[in-house]
């Protein structure tokens, strides 16, 4: 099937991405090239905070009206903050296309920054940070990033409670107005719509404005750490290593290596750690990469006495990549290409993938995935085994105290 894809940079600076589909559904996102990676130690979490604030009301709609206008038409509305971008998206029946275009644009262009909502949302985000901390598995996977990168990149995208409490409305509004400009934005549409109409509406909605060029550095390091925590029964172990950025062609060899190591129940680590030895229940991995960073993390939920063995198995299996046979690589290629084909059913997956590729360089790279994966040579995968440094983190249950209890005579 031939994909109909269109890309255009409008006179107002806005970049338009569009994939045409015939199903009566349309997904739209308005995204800005500003995420956690662009922040300093002092304002870490401000991008995520702005994302929250934009849903609290615009000059045209209050918070309830924003949600209702999408949901009462059968749609979905949401947003997210990543390292490279902050995005606001919705999905609706295509007969409501103009609403799908209008709501994300209204959020991103006309926020109210009401002072009462500003202060109230601080507490909401502090509770969100607490929730992430109490989730031992999520806390552990965030901690590995801190051990792989110096501050501020190594810090959590949500920031911490003290930073959030200290944010001032005027400072946040200034960051927003100086960085949320059309030349830094990507409007992505996937679904039943017409490209000319998308461009016409976008030209009308978005006024021309420019921002100064900004970028960020992700300074690498390799540290190890462990913590003890009361109230948990399982040890959480995470192993991490640096990897190529999304802009580097070597990323595809790492995708193949990652799928081979931790891609599902047939993967090497799942088989070795769980199935053959029963050392853990959850054995998972992830390759996260963006414009200027890339890292792999491997997670296992286990007991403290098994962490050393699991760590040794992970290192052994990574080094065994140098012995990977062509047959194994061909199977993983088919697995990855098949997964990509299946994911294309979901218009929001495609919406976000196109946007992330554009934010890093070029949206067209998304459509070259099969070609890029197919071109990876065994020697490319074998080079992944030549790791020069890694980090690990363990969150261990604190031993329960055994206090002597005296019976009353």
Image: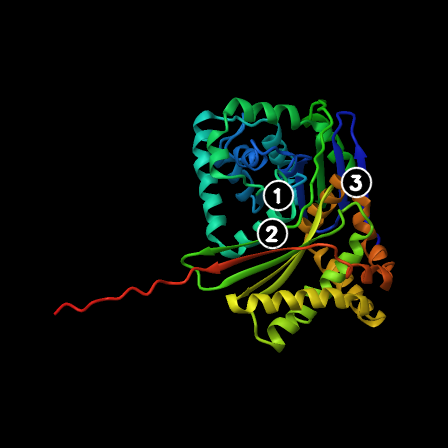
- Marks 2/1 in contact by CB < 8 Å: the verdict is no
Q: In this view, does 148 lie above or below 100?
A: below
Residue 401 lies in what quarter of the image? bottom left
Could you classify mark 2 by the number of other residues whose Cα lies within 10 Å: few (under 14), some (14-19), or many (20 or more)?
Answer: many
What is the image's colouring? Answer: rainbow
Instruction: Kindly state the secondary structure of the residue where label 3 is placed.
Output: loop
The residue under label 2 is 144
Q: Which of 21 and 281 is in front in this view?
A: 281
Q: Residue at the far bottom: name it.
A: 276
Which residue in the protein does label 3 denote?
361
Q: Where is residue 254 in the image (x, y as percent from the top left)?
A: 76, 57
Of 20 and 394, the residue lying toward us: 394
Q: How far apart are marks 3 and 1 (CA)?
A: 23 Å
How far, Cα to Cα, is label 3 from label 2? 27 Å
Residue 154: mark = 1
Q: What's the distance in space between the residues labelled 2 and 1, CA to CA?
A: 9 Å
Image quarter of the C terminus: bottom left
Sequence-first disc among 3 and 2: 2
């Amino acid at each position: 099937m031939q994909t109909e894809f269109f890309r255009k940079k409008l006179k107002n600076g806005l970049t338009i991405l569009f994939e045409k589909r015939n199903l009566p559904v349309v997904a739209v996102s308005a995204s800005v090239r500003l995420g956690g990676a662009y922040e300093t130690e002092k304002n870490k979490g401000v991008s995520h905070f702005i994302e929250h604030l934009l849903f609290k009301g615009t000059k045209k709609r209050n918070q309830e009206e924003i949600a209702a206008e999408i949901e009462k038409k059968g749609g979905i509305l949401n947003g997210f903050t990543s390292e490279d971008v902050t995005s606001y998206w919705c999905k609706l029946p295509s007969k409501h296309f103009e609403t799908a275009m209008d709501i994300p644009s209204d959020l991103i262009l006309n926020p109210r920054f009401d002072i009462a909502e500003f202060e109230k949302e601080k507490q909401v985000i502090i509770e969100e940070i607490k929730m992430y901390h109490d989730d031992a598995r999520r806390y552990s996977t965030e901690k590995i990033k801190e051990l792989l990168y110096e501050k501020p990149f190594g810090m959590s995208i949500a920031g911490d409670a003290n930073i959030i409490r200290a944010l001032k409305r005027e400072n946040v509004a200034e960051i927003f107005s100086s960085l949320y400009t059309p030349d830094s934005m990507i409007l992505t549409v996937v679904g039943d719509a017409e490209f000319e109409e998308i461009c016409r509406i976008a030209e009308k909605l978005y006024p021309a404005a420019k921002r100064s060029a900004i970028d960020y550095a992700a300074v690498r390091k390799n540290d190890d750490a462990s913590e003890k925590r009361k109230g948990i029964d399982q040890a959480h172990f995470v192993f991490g290593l640096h990897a190529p950025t999304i802009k580097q062609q070597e990323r595809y060899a790492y995708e193949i290596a990652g799928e081979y190591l931790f891609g599902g129940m047939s993967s090497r680590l799942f088989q070795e750690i769980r199935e053959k030895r029963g050392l853990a229940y959850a054995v998972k991995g992830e390759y996260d990469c963006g414009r200027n960073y890339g890292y792999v993390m491997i997670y296992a939920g286990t007991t403290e006495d098994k962490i050393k063995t699991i760590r040794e198995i992970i290192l052994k299996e990574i080094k065994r990549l140098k012995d990977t046979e062509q047959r194994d690589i061909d199977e993983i290629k088919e697995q990855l290409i098949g997964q990509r084909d299946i994911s294309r059913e979901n218009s929001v997956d495609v919406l976000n993938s196109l946007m992330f590729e554009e934010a890093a360089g070029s949206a067209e790279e998304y459509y070259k995935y099969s070609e890029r994966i197919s071109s990876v040579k065994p020697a490319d995968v074998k080079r992944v085994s030549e790791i020069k440094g890694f980090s690990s983190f363990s969150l261990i249950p604190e031993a329960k105290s055994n206090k002597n209890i005296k019976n009353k005579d």
